[in-house]
Image: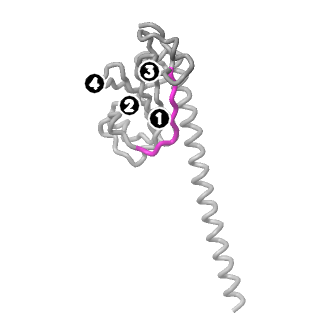
Amino acid sequence: MEMIIVLLFFSISGAVCIQLFAKAHLISEASVNLNQATMYAESMAELFQGYSGDAVMMSKDSALDSLVITDKENTDKKTLILLFDKDWNILQSPANPETQSKAAFLLMAEIEELPAAVVYADTQYALNISLDQSAAVCNIEVLDIQTQDLTKISPDKIEGTPIYSLKTDIYLGRK
């Protein structure tokens, strides 16, 4: 009888230990994904600042192989899309359906040029901005898309689990 109680105690202890290791693995994986997402989003924000919000120039950067989508209704709004595999390597030719099937993570940077008075309306500088000045705004979002089907990439239809998001802007001056 004592041996059965000891075996029961060890089996319960073993089950608890296995659950702890499984949870630790999931937390570690989420931490790696958050670190990578943060790094790539911040790199995209730096490119945005460096190219003064020019999406076309950003997409031609040698470090990126991105897809640029122009909004049909608003030509001042462009979306850059980067695809990553499960190990966070940038996938080449993101418009290719075969590449899309390998994608596990997606970085989407929506860039739009707006009047500076609108962008900076909530700041102390709003009174000094005239209507003919502009600013570029970039909303960057990194998504886990491992369970999604990316047959046609469209910013309106992309769904996934958000990992990290970042918003930045740059003052462009007079048009």
Residue located 47% across and 35% down the image? 141
Which stretch appears magenta?
160-169
Q: Position of residue 75 (x, y in %)?
A: 32, 19
Q: Nearer the viewer, residue 131 or 135?
A: 131
Q: CA distance from mark 1 to mark 4?
A: 22 Å
The amino acid type found where label 1 is placed reads: Glu
Give residue 4's quadrant in the image: bottom right
Residue depth check, mark 1 versus mark 3: number of the one nearer the observer = 3
The amino acid type found where label 4 is placed reads: Glu
The amino acid type found where label 3 is placed reads: Val
Extreme-front residue of the structure: 127
Q: CA distance from mark 1 to mark 2?
A: 17 Å
The residue singled out by tag 3 in the image is: 118
Q: CA distance from mark 3 to mark 2?
A: 33 Å
Q: Position of residue 131 (x, y in %)?
A: 42, 11
Residue located 46% across and 36% down the image? 84
- In screen coordinates, is 44 left or right of 12? left
Q: Nearer the viewer, residue 74 or 83?
A: 74
Sequence-wise first label, 3 or 2? 2
The residue singled out by tag 2 in the image is: 94
